[in-house]
Image (cartoon, rainbow, N blue to C red):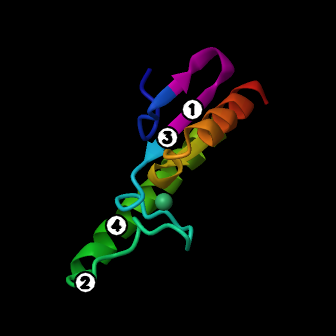
Amino acid sequence: MDLPGKPDLVFGPKKKAIFVHGCFWHQHCDPACKIARLPKSRQEYWKPKLQRNVARDLEHQRSLKGSGWHVLTIWECQTKDVEALAGRIQKFLNG
Ligand SMILES: [Zn+2]
């Protein structure tokens, strides 16, 4: 199945898709996230590059939702708490 943004997990019959995003490359916008922070040097290089990734992610999600998909994004920093993560995924798939 060729879906916008190539979600990491796809549950076709339920029309549910899960993205697992690296906090840095996809710029996790949670202020508590330490991984997403930009390096102090070469910000003029990183900023536009990463902003393009974020814009692309939004675009993919919009087009998925537009065609009736439910989308869950899991961030790298959230994968450490496996139990909480499993709960979220279960809720997403059953909900
Ligand atoms: Zn994060």
Q: Residue at x 53, y 68 (%)?
A: 29
Q: Secondary structure at mark 1?
A: strand
Residue farthest right in this picture: 95
Main secondary structure of the magenta stretch:
strand
Taking the view exactly as shown, the residue that stands out farthest to the top is 13
Mark 1, residue position: 17
Nearer to the camera, 47 or 23? 23
* Earlier residue among tags 3 and 2: 3
Q: Tell me how far mark 2 sits from mark 4, CA to CA.
A: 11 Å
First in sequence: mark 1 vs mark 4 = 1
| Residue 68 in view, yes or no | no
Could you give the CA–CA distance between mark 4 and mark 3, rounded to whole angstroms? 17 Å
Q: Helix, strand or loop at disc 4? A: helix
- Image position of 8 (left or right of 82): left
Membership of 16 in magenta stretch? yes
Mark 3 residue crowding within 10 angstroms, few (<14) / some (14–19) / many (20+): some
Q: Which residues are magenta?
A: 10-19
Residue picked out by circle 3: 19
Three-letter code, disc 3: Phe
- Which amino acid lies under the numbered mark 4 shown in the image of this protein? Leu
Give neighbour class at mark 2: few <14, some 14-19, many 20+ (Cα, 10 Å): few
Numbered tag placed on residue 50 in the rendering: 4
Instruction: Of the two numbered discs 4 and 3 on the same chain, state the one appearing first in sequence.
Output: 3
